[in-house]
Image (cartoon, rainbow, N blue to C red):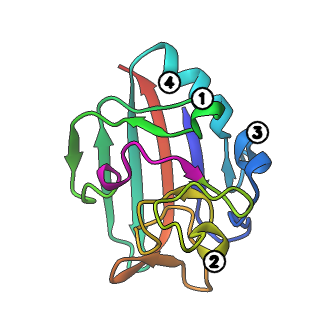
């Protein structure tokens, strides 16, 4: 099941808590299914998370996490579990493990002096504002990813 898709920047991911809670966009284009839906799906059964990224040069890589789960809203939709990582995209989510989700209007990130989401980075599980972020601002050529720019990402989950 696809839970997030970005590929052309037509949809802003710079949004408030309620949007991330219920989801936004359309499955035929860019979208995010919503934190509440992801929680309901992942809290009952173990799920794998597959993230496919493609950079602006067309190079693709994947990150697979064997036990993906997020908490409930009263837990800040914290990234509760990832399980074992495999793939060639790099283990970019383990640094965010146990972090609560932060949005423009709800600062739950580890940087208490700033709101990483409000400072132009989009909603995410922040450990620091410079973290690699699948929801970062999309520019004409893509969105920042370390030393490169990504053109697209797809996040998918499936029962294990």
Pointer 3 or 2: first along the chain:
3
Can the viewer see residue 137? Answer: no
Q: Secondary structure at mark 3?
A: helix
Q: Are marks 3 and 2 in contact (CB under 8 Å)?
A: no
Residue at the spot 40% in from the left edge and 42% down from the top edge = 98
Q: Could you say which disc has been placed on residue 42 in the image?
A: 4
Pointer 4 or 2: first along the chain:
4
Say which quarter of the image contains residue 131.
bottom left
Q: Alpha-carbon distance for marks 4 and 1?
A: 10 Å
Pointer 4 or 3: first along the chain:
3
Q: Alpha-carbon distance for marks 4 and 2?
A: 29 Å
Q: Secondary structure at mark 4?
A: helix
Residue at the spot 36% in from the left edge and 45% down from the top edge = 97
Label 4 crowd bin: few (<14), some (14–19), many (20+), radius 10 Å = many
In the figure, 125 relative to 55: above or below?
Answer: above
Q: Position of residue 13 (x, y in %)?
A: 68, 63
Q: Alpha-carbon distance for marks 3 and 2?
A: 21 Å
**Residue on which the image places disc 1:** 72
**Residue on which the image places disc 2:** 120
The quadrant of the picture occupied by the C terminus is top left
Q: Alpha-carbon distance for marks 3 and 1?
A: 13 Å
Can the viewer see residue 49? Answer: yes
Identify the magenta region.
Answer: 93-101
In the figure, 72 relative to 96: above or below?
Answer: above
């Amino acid at each position: 099941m696809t839970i997030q898709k970005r590929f052309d920047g037509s949809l802003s991911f710079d949004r408030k808590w309620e949007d991330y809670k219920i989801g936004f966009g359309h499955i035929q284009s860019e979208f995010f299914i919503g934190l509440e839906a992801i929680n309901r799906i992942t809290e009952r059964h173990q799920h794998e998370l597959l993230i496919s990224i493609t950079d602006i040069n067309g190079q693709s890589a994947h990150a697979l996490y064997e036990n993906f789960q997020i908490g409930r809203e009263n837990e800040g939709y914290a990234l509760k579990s990832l399980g074992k990582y495999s793939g060639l995209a790099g283990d970019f989510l383990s640094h965010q493990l146990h972090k609560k989700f932060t949005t423009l209007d709800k600062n739950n990130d580890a940087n208490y002096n700033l709101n990483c989401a409000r400072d132009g980075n989009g909603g995410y599980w922040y450990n620091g504002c410079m973290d690699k972020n699948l929801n970062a601002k999309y520019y004409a050529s893509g969105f920042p990813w370390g030393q490169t720019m990504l053109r697209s990402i797809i996040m998918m989950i499936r029962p294990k």
